Image (cartoon, grey):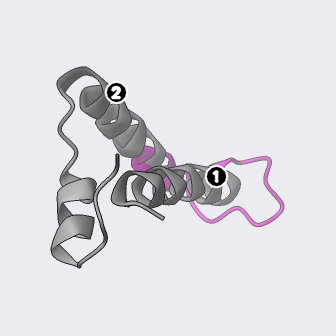
């Protein structure tokens, strides 16, 4: 997998997990404060789509994951 694929998979998983744990109707509800993580990830996805700059992808490349095509 390339760095951009891992970044998007990670973002998607983080959104789904925080929604599952932060939604009051969820059977495994922890705290509605977790929804701020969902908002943060969404805002980062929006800005990376507009600016073509993603901090997570830079971090992944420093870990040695090959860049996207």
Q: Main secondary structure of the magenta part?
A: loop
**Is residue 23 toward the left or the right of residue 13 in the image?**
right
The one of 4 and 9 positioned closer to us in this rendering: 4
| Crowding at mark 1 (Cα within 10 Å: few <14, some 14-19, many 20+) | few
Q: Is residue 32 magenta?
A: yes
Q: Quadrant of residue 51?
A: top left
**Residue 59's spot in the image, x, y percent?**
20, 66
The outermost residue toward the front is: 69
Residue 46 disc label: 2
Secondary structure under tag 2 reads helix
Q: What residue is shown at x 26% (from left), y 33% (from top)?
A: 48
**Residue 61's spot in the image, x, y percent?**
21, 67
The one of 44 and 27 positioned closer to us in this rendering: 44
**Residue 56's spot in the image, x, y percent?**
26, 57
Residue 30 disc label: none
Number of the front mark, 2 or 1: 2
The outermost residue toward the right is: 27
Q: What residue is shown at x 40% (from left), y 56% (from top)?
A: 7
The one of 69 and 54 positioned closer to us in this rendering: 69
Q: Is residue 30 above or below residue 47?
A: below
Q: Which residues are magenta?
A: 23-37
Q: What residue is shown at x 71% (from left), y 48% (from top)?
A: 24
| Crowding at mark 2 (Cα within 10 Å: few <14, some 14-19, many 20+) | few
Q: Which residue is mark 1?
A: 16
Give the mark nearer the N terminus: 2 vs 1: 1
Q: What residue is shown at x 24% (from left), y 78% (from top)?
A: 64
Q: Are marks 2 and 1 in contact (CB under 8 Å)?
A: no
Q: Is residue 60 magenta?
A: no
Q: Quadrant of residue 13?
A: bottom right
**Is residue 8 toward the left or the right of residue 12 in the image?**
left
Secondary structure under tag 1 reads helix
């Amino acid at each position: 997998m390339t760095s951009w694929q891992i970044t998007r998979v990670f973002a998607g998983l983080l959104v789904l997990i925080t929604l599952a744990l932060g939604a009051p109707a969820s059977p495994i509800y922890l705290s509605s404060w977790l929804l701020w993580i969902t908002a943060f990830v969404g805002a980062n996805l929006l800005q990376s789509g507009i600016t073509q700059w993603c901090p997570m992808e830079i971090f992944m490349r420093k870990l040695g994951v090959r860049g996207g095509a």
